[in-house]
Image: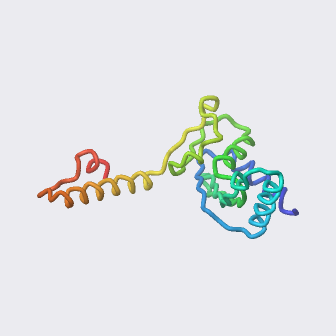
Amino acid sequence: MKVQPFVAFLEKTLANTPTKHIDDKHNTVMSIVKEITAEQERALSKGKDPDKVRSGIQTTNVSGVYPQGEIVLYKTGLHHSGEIIAQILGARTIEEQVIIMADVSSSNTSKLDLNKNKHIKIANCNSHAFRKFKELAKSEQEVAKKYRVKNHKISESIDYFI
């Protein structure tokens, strides 16, 4: 692929940005679906369970933030964001602190050894946390309505976070 040297340069540059954002979105790419199907058929022919073949196609967005702007890379394939960010951080040439902003999905940091890499800080997304507190408040209201609790007020702790 002719653009591979440029992509490698972007990945190395992105590895050294002080702040990174990552996210996965499910995606379907027909050529990858064909590869998965072929791998499942091979597993079946060997007497193995075809459902154990990796089949989750993700598009991972990794962006690195510099004062001058952002570098944004998209990778689509049989991976998750934790694998991609671990690969990218493997290209780091500096030991400065790096902040990774992501949702709370365990796959986002599953391949990072945070005990070994003390300079990596994880900042989970506030908007995802906020949505969970809104869900809790709604659930409380539904329970109060079901049991006909009059003048129900949201729990102090939930109200505090909202």
Task: Give me the residue at 39% from left, 53% from top.
Answer: 132
Q: Residue furthest left?
A: 150
Describe the colour scheme in one phrase.
Answer: rainbow
Task: Give me the residue at 59% from left, 56% from top.
Answer: 23
Q: Residue furthest front?
A: 47
Please give left or right for residue 95 compared with residue 155 in the image.
right
Q: Is residue 43 above or below residue 117?
A: below
Task: Give me the residue at 63% from left, 34% from top.
Answer: 113
Of 136 and 48, nearer the camera is 48
Q: Residue 64: where, in percent of width, then height?
A: 63, 52
Q: Residue furthest right?
A: 2
Quarter containing the N terminus: bottom right
Please give left or right for residue 106 compared with residue 79 in the image.
left
Of 58 and 49, nearer the camera is 49
Task: Give me the residue at 50% from left, 44% from top.
Answer: 123
Q: Give the mark count.
A: 0
Residue 72 appearing in the image: no
Q: Residue 128: where, in percent of width, then height?
A: 44, 54
Q: Residue furthest top?
A: 116
Residue 33 appearing in the image: yes
Q: Residue 16: where, in percent of width, then height?
A: 68, 44
- Residue 114: quadrant of the picture: top right
Please give left or right for residue 30 compared with residue 69 in the image.
right
Of 157 and 63, nearer the camera is 157
Q: Residue 51: where, in percent of width, then height?
A: 69, 55
